[in-house]
Amino acid sequence: MTVPVIRNALESNSDLHITLVTNQFFAPFFFGIPRLRLFFPDLNDRHKGVVGLVKLYHDLEGLGPFACILDLHDVLRTNIVRTLFKWNGTPVFTIDSGRKDKKIILRTKKIKQLKHTTERYIETFHQAGIKITIGDAPFIYYSTESFQIARSYMLGKIPGTDYLKIGLSPFANSVSKIWGLENFNELISLINQNHKAVFFLFGGGEKEIQLLSQLEQLHENIHLVAGKYTLSEEIAMIRMLDLMIAMDSSNMHLASLSNVKTISIWGGTHPAFGFYPLNQPDKYRIQPPEGSPSCRPCSVDGGKPCKFSTTKCMQMIQPSEVYQSLISLKLLKPKDSGAIQ
């Protein structure tokens, strides 16, 4: 969710240069952003522990001097590094992550829509005197090579131009945010009955990919992408979709940042915390119906284990209801139609 902010900051301020400290895996998110230098810390070796964070500070200091430091994460590691910069006289600006308001929602279960996380990033830049106005997606790009590989693959799987290209991302980083492959299988069957569509499966580690491969075998118009292509190539494929149906997960954000219509399904977490897909209509967020368990939301990011053996709030969302939502939102087209309604 930092991508649109950093891209806009650099595109709107021609004299600005940014060094971003991030995981090397995330490098493709920032492809093509001008005057952006990526620094990948080695948190398993050189930059591990408190001593390692001091080394990280010195390594970054050697890339400076910096006009200011922006802490967009505000966790223990970043707190230590930013404090060292503050001690040497570098101005430091830290995100207001809204932890107090989020804790109130968790404790009282009284839902109040909080700022989107991207807005909090923007405010941090504004503190530093860097003006940003977020425009319309897409915000995320890819290399020409990645596009060619993605395009060749996608064209080889689509029977005709009248077929809807639907991405599915059934997994997330916690059980409380997962709807279940059984529900996805039923939803696919409902769509196949009345619509021309091809499905592409995204996301997941080794275990999840094995499960997705089983789902792939159940329908001839499903194709597994996860684990077969680079992140940059997956981003290019997502950009080519007509629709993404995802959990509260990274693929949800990748689709929205790619200007793809994104249906998000919510269980243990809640859009009120500010992690909903950017620039997508509120009605694209599917949540449990009225009367869902009083424990929802159980955590901000899904990290708290569900007190039930299965995630009850997710069980209350029926595939038929999701299908009817897709119909009412005009995100599906009849088999005899040549265009999306």
Image (cartoon, grey):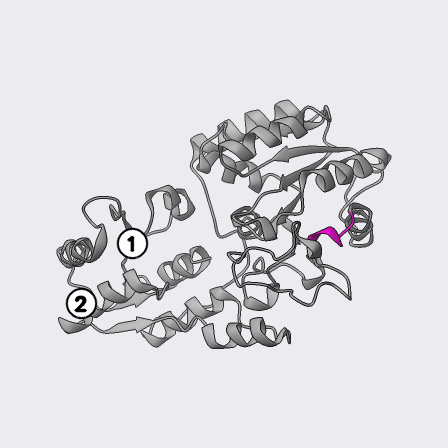
Q: Position of residue 312 (x, y in %)?
A: 70, 55
Rendered residue at 53%/71% (across/down)? 115
Between 105 and 237, the one nearer to me in the picture: 105
Q: Please name the residue that numbered disc 2 is placed on.
A: 84
Q: Is residue 239 above or below residue 298?
A: above
| Foreground: disc 2 or disc 1 | 2
Q: Amino acid at mark 2?
A: Leu
Q: Please name the residue that numbered disc 1 is placed on.
A: 21
Q: Is residue 80 left or right of residue 310?
A: left
Inspect the magenta stretch and tell me whether residue 316 lies in it. Answer: yes
Between 170 and 230, the one nearer to me in the picture: 170
Between 339 and 177, the one nearer to me in the picture: 177
> Where, by quadrant of the figure, is residue 188 drawn?
top right
Rendered residue at 78%/66% (across/down)? 290
Instruction: Please give the range of residues in magenta.
Output: 314-318
Q: Position of residue 47 (x, y in %)?
A: 21, 50
Instruction: For marks 2 and 1, give the CA distance.
Output: 15 Å
Q: Of helix, strand and loop, which one carries label 2? A: helix
> Where, by quadrant of the figure, is residue 337 drawn?
top right
Q: Position of residue 286 (x, y in %)?
A: 71, 57
Q: Amino acid at mark 1?
A: Val
Q: Is residue 43 above or below residue 307?
A: above
Q: Position of residue 267 (x, y in %)?
A: 65, 56
Inspect the magenta stretch and tell me whether residue 13 lies in it. Answer: no
Q: Of helix, strand and loop, which one carries label 1? A: strand
